[in-house]
Amino acid sequence: MSDDLKTRLLVVDDEQSIRKLCMTIGTSLGYECAEAESAESALTRIEAEAPDLVLTDLKLPNQSGVELLKRTKEILPHTEIAIMTGHGSIESAVDAMKLGAYDYIEKPFRVEKMRLLLQRMSEKVRLVTENEFLRERVSTETNLDGIIGASANIQDVLRMISRLKDTRTPVLVSGESGTGKELVARAIHFRGALAKTPFVAVDCGSLVPTLMESELFGYEKGAFTGATKSKAGLFQAANSGTIFLDEIGEMPLQLQTKILRVLQEREVQRIGSSEPVPVDVRVIAASNQSLVRAVAQRRFRDDLYYRLNVVALRMPPLRERISDIPELALHFLDKVARQESCTPKRIDPSALDVLMRYGWPGNVRQLEHALESAVALSGSRTTLYPKDFDLPMEMIAAELDPLALLDVPESGINFEELIMGIERRLLERALQKSGGNKARAANMLNMKRTTLISKFKSLETCA
């Protein structure tokens, strides 16, 4: 499990020994743990890190655990909160449960009792998340155009969207061009609590560097030649909502400093003005290049990177989710049919085989364009064949060498899923060429018939 999918536990207590003990228990359960000694510092972490579980003492230095409970529930309604209390405060802890606390535990507590409490809380969070994920998946696929698939990689993405949609946590989305990074940003925004607030997408790579500052932060009348009237920037346009900074790695260093100030101070300063303007925006950034490498090469500020990279979400390239191609293809054919007001075309198995053997360097976007082109080239025919797809010469390399298009990107691959996908396609192709005769298919693959059947069953179990 990736770190971003681990259960996040925040322990709030002014006694360091209690915090350390609770964090040790949480770590033993595989949780990602953090601590705070007061309600004030806890709220800062809650807003920035969106924990799944909060374990708080009832009595804190300034604000009480009950006050922290109320504020946390306003920010993160699905976060589960348990109260730690002394014997004389049990009545107050029970009252806290009426306000939404999951449970309370008396101090001093036994390690095993705390362990069971955290496990029960985590299981409730998991069940709520899974139920929301299943409901959101249908809506997301239907309305947000293209976040589709049953592969493990894309299911992790959908789960992360379910977890992040109701938070203001900064998110950094990485992935190659064409993988759907903006779709993820739109899904996080429009599936959650901020859905009715502004969503502003900014392509940092397409903005003219000399105009970028005025576009993002705005300017006052007379600030420069041509500024005939004042104009609000894109950050102000996104106020109370989400700003999506696509290809943020293309942003000049000087402007990165000003973006960092906006994130830290929550205010912008228009060109030509000395008065800061407060803004309250959730920032989702995306990059198709390695920002870690850009930081090492001093092309990207490390403090801005860490400010943006509170939660990292990686969009897998299409070559790592080959099993999703049939579902994606049907989705895009339905989309073309809706646009043209006609019956969707079908794909001949031979054409689908070609699509699943191609490397798709342009990812999902390239697949969509290829299908649109194939529909146009097929004319009045209702079925698409391999000849309808105008794919580049890399296909020839794949025919000559099955491994020609396989690569190990720096971002890594899901080795087991890739191997299972290759194995599944070989088994299905042999069965297709043998006319469904399992013995012949096994012979073509130089294996026993029972081995072939066993492999099919194993792959079905993993699907």
Image (tube, rainbow, N blue to C red):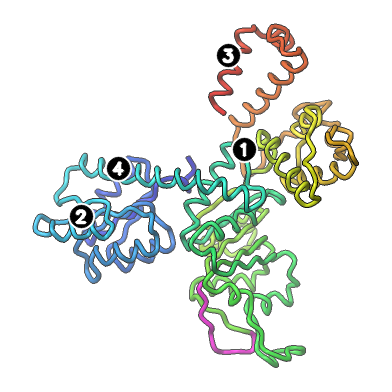
Residue 413's x, y, as percent?
Answer: 62, 38
The mark found on residue 413 in the picture is 1
Ranked by sequence position, the earlier of labels 2 and 4 is 2
Q: Secondary structure at mark 4?
A: helix
Residue 415's x, y, as percent?
Answer: 60, 32
Q: Is residue 217 above or below residue 104?
A: below
Q: Amino acid at mark 1?
A: Ile
Residue 386's x, y, as percent?
Answer: 85, 32
Q: CA distance from mark 2 to mark 4?
A: 16 Å
- Is there a contact, CB below 8 Å, between mark 2 and mark 1? no
Q: Secondary structure at mark 1?
A: loop
Q: Amino acid at mark 3?
A: Ser
Magenta residue check for 273: yes
Identify the residue under disc 4.
120
- Is there a contact, CB below 8 Å, between mark 2 and mark 4? no
Q: Is residue 151 above or below residue 268?
A: above
The mark found on residue 454 in the picture is 3
Q: Is residue 81 left or right of residue 201?
A: left
The mark found on residue 189 in the picture is none
Instruction: Judge by depth and name the residue closer to the eye, 3 or 347.
Output: 347
Q: Amino acid at mark 2?
A: Met
- Is there a contact, CB below 8 Å, between mark 2 and mark 3? no
- Is there a contact, CB below 8 Å, between mark 3 and mark 4? no
- Is there a contact, CB below 8 Å, between mark 1 and mark 4? no
Residue 15's x, y, as percent?
Answer: 21, 59
